[in-house]
Amino acid sequence: QVQLVESGGGLVQPGGSLRLSCAASGSIGSIDAMGWYRQAPGKERELVAAIPTSYADSVKGRFTISRDNAKNTVYLQMNSLKPEDTAVYYCKGDIRPTWWSGRALTYWGKGTLVTVSS
């Protein structure tokens, strides 16, 4: 089994910062890619940032994604937060379990809520 667990969400005022973490655990052989997505109420899930590095236009210059390979953990540093950043943030990993010899499998975390409000 492979699990992704997010943490770090919460309530923050506009202009504030939060740092999200996503730790992958279990029978991990290798990790091809990891990323962050978000889903706001009434909207579709969208890519926020990923490694190999890519960012949504709406977060460029404000959010930074990073990864600690030794800990199988990916981070999302979010600065200058805006009310429109309010959403459930999900971690996604393309991971090859130790028991799998095919292409990487996609795993999702359960999400962490980020609320930007005064």
Image (spheres, grey):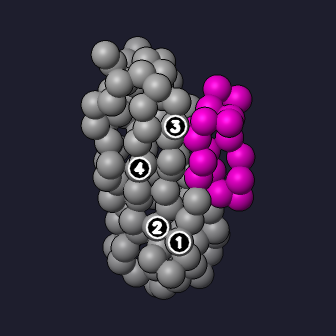
Residue flagged by tag 3: what amino acid is it?
Answer: Asn
User: In which quadrant of the rendered view does residue 113 lie?
Assistant: top left
Q: Which residue is mark 2?
A: 73
Nearer to us: label 3 or label 4: 3
Estimate the spatial distance between the alpha carbons at disc 3 and disc 1, rounded to whole Å. 20 Å
Q: Residues within 10 Å of mark 2 (few under 14, many from 20)?
A: some
Q: Is residue 113 magenta?
A: no
Q: Which residue is mark 3?
A: 79
Q: Earlier in the sequence, mark 4 or mark 2?
A: 4
Task: Give the magenta range.
Answer: 47-65
Q: Residues within 10 Å of mark 1 (few under 14, many from 20)?
A: few
Estimate the spatial distance between the alpha carbons at disc 3 and disc 4, rounded to whole Å. 11 Å
Give me the residue at 42% from left, 31% from top. Answer: 16
Counting from the top left corner in percent of width and height, residue 48 is at: 58, 38
Q: Residues within 10 Å of mark 3 (few under 14, many from 20)?
A: some
Nearer to us: label 3 or label 1: 3
Q: Is residue 43 above or below residue 72?
A: above
Label 1 residue SS: strand
Estimate the spatial distance between the alpha carbons at disc 4 and disc 2, rounded to whole Å. 10 Å
Nearest the eye: 86 or 104: 86
Q: Which residue is mark 4?
A: 20
The reply to whether callout 3 and callout 1 are in contact (CB within 8 Å) is no
Q: Left or right: where does residue 44 sit relative to residue 6? A: right
Estimate the spatial distance between the alpha carbons at disc 4 and disc 1, rounded to whole Å. 13 Å
Q: Earlier in the sequence, mark 1 or mark 2?
A: 1
User: In which quadrant of the rendered view does residue 58 lie?
Assistant: top right
Name the disc covering residue 68, or none.
Answer: 1
